[in-house]
Image (spheres, rainbow, N blue to C red):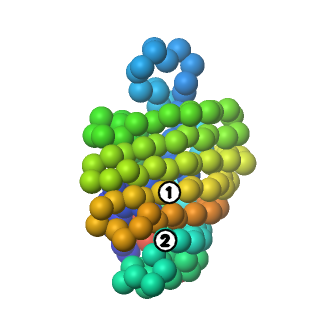
């Protein structure tokens, strides 16, 4: 089963965080958004990411079923290419210009972490911590807090993820699409 995940979806944001947000804070001008490296810290090709989530703040609401579905482990394959890499970086930069700000940026050769806050009809914030184990393995966590007038109370999503490179050939998985494995 192939599924196309728009960049704005939670899963795509997490895949982007897991595979393609090497952020460079050195040489950053005061008040300027962080520069994002054009060089990938991981190998290109077919990647598989397993995510597991818990959602709190929706108990006893119609959204509880959605929270239960998100809590199941999901495995998605995606194709990472140099062109996809550049487009993801451009998309991330565009998010920074549309009511989202990046802060607390930390990067080393083995870890990337940052906070992002977006405010449209509420306050949504995320903390991302990705460990780059090697060019073929990453793992990390994402904590999202969503507060919106349309929600009965704030919602928190805690996600863990582990990604590994399957191989250099993406097979039938096209860049920008995800293939749900489980």
Question: In the rendering, at what x and y percent does residue 50 appear?
Answer: 59, 68
Question: In the rendering, at what x and y percent does residue 143 appear?
Answer: 56, 56
Q: Is residue 121 visible?
A: yes
Q: Can residue 170 be seen in this view?
A: no
In the depicted structure, whether residue 33 falls above or below residue 3? above
**Quadrant of the image containing the N terminus:** bottom left
Q: Nearer the viewer, mark 2 or mark 1?
A: 2
Question: In the rendering, at what x and y percent does residue 144 appear?
Answer: 50, 57
Figure quadrant of residue 86: top left
For this rendering, which residue is in front, 164 or 103? 103
Are there few (<14), some (14-19), or many (20+) residues within 10 Å of tag 2?
Answer: some
Residue marked by disc 1: 144
Whether residue 104 sits left or right of residue 79 in the image: it is right
Question: In the rendering, at what x and y percent does residue 49 appear?
Answer: 57, 64
Q: Residue visible at 44% across and 63% down?
A: 154
Are there few (<14), some (14-19), or many (20+) residues within 10 Å of tag 1?
Answer: many
Q: Residue visible at 55% across and 24% down?
A: 25
Q: Which of marks 2 and 1 is nearer the N terminus?
A: 2
Query: What label does residue 57 carry, if any?
Result: 2
Helix, strand or loop status at disc 2: loop
Q: Residue visible at 66% across and 55% down?
A: 139
Q: How many labels does the image show?
A: 2
Q: Rounded to the nearest whole Å, what is the CA distance between mark 2 and mark 1?
A: 12 Å
Q: Residue visible at 54% across and 27% down?
A: 24
For this rendering, which residue is in front, 65 or 19? 65
For this rendering, which residue is in front, 140 or 173? 140
In the depicted structure, whether residue 57 falls above or below residue 137? below
For this rendering, which residue is in front, 150 or 42? 150
């Amino acid at each position: 089963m192939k599924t196309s995940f728009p960049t704005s979806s939670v899963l795509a944001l997490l895949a982007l965080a897991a595979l393609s947000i090497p952020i460079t804070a050195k040489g950053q001008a005061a008040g300027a958004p962080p520069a994002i490296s054009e060089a990938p810290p991981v190998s290109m090709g077919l990647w598989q990411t397993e995510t597991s989530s818990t959602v709190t703040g929706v108990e006893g609401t119609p959204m509880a079923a959605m929270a239960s579905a998100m809590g199941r482990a999901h495995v998605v394959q995606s194709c990472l290419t140099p062109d996809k890499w550049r487009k993801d970086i451009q998309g991330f930069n565009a998010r920074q210009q549309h009511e989202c700000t990046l802060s607390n940026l930390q990067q080393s050769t083995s870890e990337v972490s940052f906070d992002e806050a977006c405010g449209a009809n509420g306050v949504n914030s995320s903390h991302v911590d990705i460990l780059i184990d090697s060019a073929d393995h990453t793992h990390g966590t994402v904590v999202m807090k969503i507060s919106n007038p349309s929600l009965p109370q704030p919602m928190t999503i805690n996600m863990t993820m582990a990604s590994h490179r399957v191989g250099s050939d993406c097979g039938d998985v096209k860049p920008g699409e995800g293939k749900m494995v489980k």
